[in-house]
Image (cartoon, grey):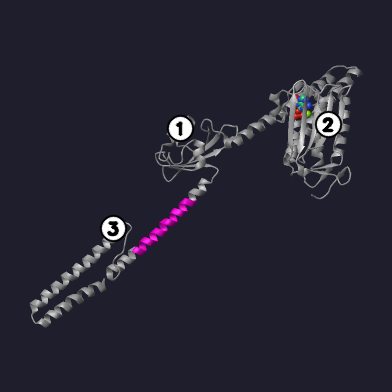
Amino acid sequence: MLLRLASFLIVVIVSALLAWLLGDWRWEIAAAVVAAVIWVAVDGWRASRVLEGLRSEPPSFPVRAGFWGDLSERVRRLMRTREQQTQLAETRLQEFLAAIQASPSGVVLLDEQGRIEWCNQTAAQHFGVDAQRDVMQHVGNLVRDPVFAAYLASWNYSREVVLNGPPGTTSGGGAHPLRLSVQVHPYAGNRRLLLSRDITALEQADAMRRDFVANVSHEIRTPLTVLAGFVETMQTLPLSEAERSRYLGLMAQQSQRMQTLVNDLLTLSRLEGSPPPPTGQWISVRSLMAQCEEEGKGLSQALTPQGHQFGFSGGEGVEVAGALPELQSAMSNLLSNAIRYTPGGGRIQVTWRTLPDGRAEYCVQDSGPGIAAEHIPRLTERFYRVDRSRSRETGGTGLGLAIVKHVVQRHGAELRIESTLGTGSSFSIVFPAARVRAAFKTPAVSALPAG
Ligand SMILES: Nc1ncnc2c1ncn2[C@@H]1O[C@H](COP(=O)(O)OP(=O)(O)O)[C@@H](O)[C@H]1O
Ligand SMILES: [Mg+2]
């Protein structure tokens, strides 16, 4: 500012001096006034150029020197710094939004009037809205669920609400209709943050757990009631020795049934909680088949006086990689089902064969009653039985095929069920080629390194 004043005074004094040299004091004053006017005009013109430059889009800075040049330069630098700060803030905002976009929860930002300011893709799917088109729409107009409307209007958001997803939507493209848990969190005065969570799987697991507990309780209660009845009879009635021994036999049967159930439950929980079966432990298929044969023939004789016609084939010189107790249990389970459900005298064929692509198949085929097609997809569900009384009569728990399915999955194998009513059924396990090899020698069980 001082420099500017100095330059103005110099111009005025120099022109006054020049006039003084001409020798008249009036000239002196006139020259000083003219110089001052010229200076102000030039200065004003430079100022207007700077202003014009700032007003243009994008702004330009035509004046470089002097006071106005300096001012222009400072404004330019200030603008550049601001621009960089804005860009940085914009980048930060975009990163922040991308992070919320990646969240597995639905996120919706509502303004004071309850209009959608922003929502992520998950929320758009949860509520059936369009993340772009529906911005600034009132959320109450888009999500019509009365429970949600009442919740939103209540301004009491201490708990979450559970809603159905939009009609026709399923969880993750699965079979179950979408169920949502929604909670609102107010912020910055009357703005609201709405969070939604897909709880379909959680509810499904809850329902399954409840069913499972109910089933187990029911399965245990039945033999327990029978046992308690016999105990009471024996305590209250005078019984002959023959009656006593008959009742004790029946009681033993019931306690055996409970024991089998508990064993099956333990097997299932062990399968769920244990590490995957080894890939480097090779088991002789011949010995697995021999064990099945021994158990199967024993069971057949115990169940029917006439027994069954058995055929066992294949498995010589082959090894399979996996956990011995699991494989034995799965293979025996399929065979024991065939024996239990095929009436005495029926045919049961057990085969091991290597398929052309290197995989191997263990197959149990029976000439029993067969299973109607609608039951087949559900057979591996826990406690699912086609014929409850037949299963119970033969000592079944309803868990056998659930155990088989678990073992099969853990070994990367596949369970195939084919059946025709009145003709018979065939249950087979197809092992992947990586778990099958020709035996080097013929030990019962050999533990060799992977390869
Ligand atoms: N070989 C078979 N022939 C006919 N029905 C079978 C056969 N194997 C299994 N099933 C049916 O599948 C149901 C489920 O089998 P599983 O899980 O082993 O339970 P269970 O303890 O009742 O044998 C059985 O109750 C039976 O109805
Ligand atoms: Mg069974």
Residue 220 x/y as whole percent: 75, 27
Picture quarter containing residue 330?
top right
Mark 3 and mark 1 in contact? Answer it, CB < 8 Å: no
> Closer to the N terminus: mark 3 or mark 1?
3
The kind of residue tagged 1 is Ala
Mark 3 and mark 2 in contact? Answer it, CB < 8 Å: no
Extent of the magenta region: 76-95
**Which residue in the structure is indicated by mark 3?**
55
**Which residue in the structure is indicated by mark 1?**
149
> Closer to the N terminus: mark 1 or mark 2?
1
Task: Give the CA separation, mark 1 to mark 2.
Answer: 62 Å
Residue 304 x/y as whole percent: 87, 22
* Circle 1: element type: helix
* Circle 2: element type: strand
Principal secondary structure, stretch drawn in magenta: helix
**Which residue in the structure is indicated by mark 2?**
350
Near-viewer residue (172 or 194): 172
The kind of residue tagged 3 is Arg
* Circle 3: element type: helix
